[in-house]
Image (tube, rainbow, N blue to C red):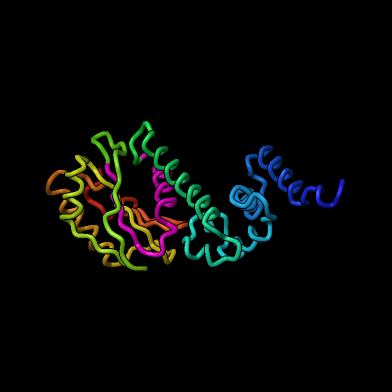
Amino acid sequence: MTQSDAKPDYLGHRERLRQRFLLSDGKDMADYELLELVLTISLPRKDVKPLAKTLINKFGSFANVVNADKDELCKISGVKENTTTILKIINVAAQRTTWQNLQSLDGPIILNLDALIDYCRSAMCYSDVEEFRLIYLDSKLHVVGQEIMQRGTINSVAIHPREVIKATMNNHAASIIMVHNHPSGSVKPSKSDVTMTERIDEACDSIGIKLLDHLVISKNDYYSFAQHNILKNKS
């Protein structure tokens, strides 16, 4: 075999990684190793281990890489459109999976708060601005839809009660759950969060719509207005 016929060393390494993944579904793999496998799809003829480690060092975790802004990813040498597309596919697949899991729950959503938190985290917690989202429920408290109502700044988002009422009625929902994220990481509601929630709760109560909860979420924590007995209209 001539030198030109020899297979690149990284091909053997890729196969070993692939076998490890198949044996444990990736559970025993470090973040950079799982990312390395992903990168082999977009960069099939290149040793991608250095790039995987660079991305993890830059963004901090596999989840942060998958959720990173495209422009920020493209600042990394070696990241091209194929790579950002693959990462975006993984991101969207995670959101769709958690949303469909939420929709398929048999019982009322209030008995499956973990599933709701999982979806909201995948959909909202990596945004660098606050987002306000409504989760629409039917009379049996099953999820029937959702909508982003507002996007704000890094530390605030404003919503008027009549916008919530109009959107809820347009979607023929009997109950709603409000959700917004705090990019800062702290889930403690601001005074404006509490005031807004109380106003919307009163408006919903006046026309027979149930505001079951208002969740403030971050990557690692959440705050439930219902659990803190702030809502009067949650039962």
Residue at image coords 40%, 38%: 100
Residue 189 magenta-highlighted = no
Looking at this view, is 232 or 100 the one in front? 100
Residue at image coords 50%, 47%: 90
Residue at image coords 30%, 53%: 148
Looking at this view, is 93 or 201 the one in front? 93
Return the x and y of residue 228 as percentages of the image width and height: 33, 54
Q: Which residue is farthest right? A: 1
Return the x and y of residue 191 as percentages of the image width and height: 28, 67
Q: Which residue is farthest left? A: 206
Return the x and y of residue 164 as percentages of the image width and height: 20, 52
Q: Quadrant of the C terminus?
A: top left
Looking at this view, is 157 or 109 the one in front? 157
| Residue interval drawn in magenta | 111-136
Marks counted in the figure total 0
Q: Quadrant of the N terminus?
A: top right
Return the x and y of residue 225 as percentages of the image width and height: 31, 54
Q: Is residue 68 left or right of residue 201?
A: right
Give above or below for 191 relative to 92.
Answer: below
Residue at image coords 55%, 54%: 83
Q: Quadrant of residue 47?
A: bottom right
Give above or below for 25 relative to 225.
Answer: above
